[in-house]
Image: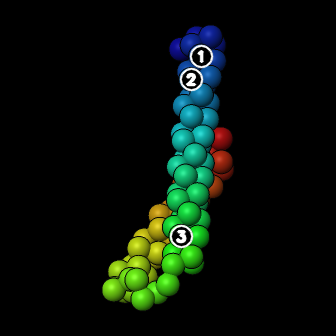
Amino acid sequence: MSASERCRRDQERASLLALEKAGTEAALNRCRALAQRIECDLRNRRSERFGDLASLAELQAALERAAWILERKSGRSAQTS
């Protein structure tokens, strides 16, 4: 493989890594914004309106888990670039 081919391949790889990192960070930001919006809406409502608080707790846990996974993925992408 010539030097120019290696250079082009390295540039393509760096570009793909940057796109992946940006996508992961954007997804994490959307997840955070959604979680904040849900939290704000829930805080403004009375708990009596919700018949199943266990379901709300499960939703919160799922959102927190998704955010944690995206943060870890984002961290790994940053380490490899």
Residue assigned mark 3: 41
Of residues 9 and 1, the one nearer the viewer is 9
Indicate the quadrant containing the C terminus: top left, top right, bottom left or bottom right. top right
Tell me if residue 66 comes above or below residue 58 in the rendering. Answer: above
Residue assigned mark 1: 8
Residue assigned mark 2: 12
Asked if residue 76 shows in the view, the reply is no
**Horizontal arrangement in the rendering, residue 69 relative to residue 76 (left or right):** left
Distance from Cα at disc 1 to Cα at disc 3: 49 Å
**Crowd around label 3: few <14 · some 14–19 · many ≥20 (10 Å):** few
Asked if residue 66 shows in the view, the reply is yes
Q: Which mark is residue 34?
A: none
**Horizontal arrangement in the rendering, residue 35 relative to residue 51 (left or right):** right
Q: Position of residue 61 (x, y in %)?
A: 45, 76
The reply to whether callout 1 and callout 2 are in contact (CB within 8 Å) is: yes
- Amino acid on which the number 2 mark rests in the picture: Glu
Q: Position of residue 52 (x, y in %)?
A: 34, 85
Q: Position of residue 54 (x, y in %)?
A: 37, 86
- Amino acid on which the number 3 mark rests in the picture: Asp
Residue drawn 61% across the image and 30% down it: 14
Residue drawn 62% across the image and 22% down it: 11
- Nearer the observer: mark 2 or 3; the answer is 3
Tell me if residue 58 comes above or below residue 14 in the rendering. Answer: below
The reply to whether callout 2 and callout 3 are in contact (CB within 8 Å) is: no
State which tag comes first along the sequence, 1 or 3. Answer: 1
- Nearer the observer: mark 1 or 3; the answer is 3
**Horizontal arrangement in the rendering, residue 64 relative to residue 8 (left or right):** left
**Crowd around label 2: few <14 · some 14–19 · many ≥20 (10 Å):** few
Residue drawn 54% across the image and 41% down it: 23
Of residues 35 and 3, the one nearer the viewer is 35
**Horizontal arrangement in the rendering, residue 44 relative to residue 48 (left or right):** right
